Image (tube, rainbow, N blue to C red):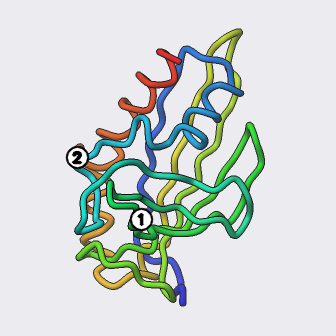
């Protein structure tokens, strides 16, 4: 259930010294390599996280014991240019299967070997406590921390 959008979207961009194909692959296929282990919601801990490369695929984390915890779903998959995900974690980081916000990531080649990555996280009205989710993901401990971690991983790949 997504309500009419009334909250401002969170917008972040980063330029990566990597070709578009590598930037997209590191963001999606190697998601678990740059996502920080302290940003997990599975009560059994964190081993890695995944984005399944297909529309309808899962966005989820896995603990060392093999248990999994869903974060959302893939709404659009257009390598190497765009991926859109649902964020289905509420303000208490509990998965809400029938409620979501949206994360759209676009990849644009700028010059040889450089890619601009634009992230828009929106539709917070669709989540319980969406205003506090927006505040967290929009802050320096949210996407403000995560995109530089992604950039470092993409540049090192």
Element class at badge 1: loop
- Residue located beneath label 2 in the image: 141
Q: Please give the name of the residue rendered at 40% of the width and 48% of the height, measured from the top-left corner.
A: 48
Q: Is residue 46 left or right of residue 155?
A: left
The CA distance from mark 1 to mark 2 is 18 Å
On the image, the x and y values in percent for residue 139 come to: 25, 50
| 86 to the left or right of 77 | left
Most distant residue in the top direction: 112
Q: In percent of the image, x 45 and y 26: which residue is there?
A: 151
Please give the residue where the numbered disc 1 appears in the rendered image: 8
Q: Position of residue 132 (x, y in %)?
A: 24, 71
Binning the other alpha carbons within 10 Å of mark 2 as few (below 14), some (14 to 19) or many (20 upward) gives few
Residue placed most toward the observer, 106 or 50? 50
Q: Secondary structure at mark 2?
A: loop
Q: Relative to the observer, which residue lies in front, 124 or 17?
A: 17
Compared across the picture, whether 52 is left or right of 131 comes to right
Q: Residue at image x 58%, y 68%?
A: 73
Percent x, y of residue 50: 52, 52
In the rendered structure, the answer to whether residue 26 lies left or right of residue 141 reads: right
């Amino acid at each position: 259930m997504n309500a009419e959008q009334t909250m401002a979207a969170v917008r972040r961009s980063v330029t990566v010294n990597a070709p578009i194909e590598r930037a997209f692959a590191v963001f999606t296929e190697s998601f678990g390599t740059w996502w920080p282990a302290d940003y997990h919601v599975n009560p059994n801990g964190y081993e890695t996280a995944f984005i399944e490369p297909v529309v309808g695929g899962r966005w989820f984390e896995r603990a060392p014991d093999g248990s999994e915890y869903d974060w959302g779903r893939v709404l659009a998959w257009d390598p190497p240019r765009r991926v859109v995900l649902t964020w289905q974690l509420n303000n208490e980081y509990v998965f809400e299967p029938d409620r979501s916000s949206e994360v759209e990531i676009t990849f644009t080649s700028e010059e040889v070997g450089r890619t601009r990555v634009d992230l828009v996280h929106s539709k917070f009205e669709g989540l319980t406590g969406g205003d506090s989710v927006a505040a967290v993901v929009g802050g320096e401990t949210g996407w403000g921390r995560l995109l530089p971690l992604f950039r470092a991983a993409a540049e090192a790949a």
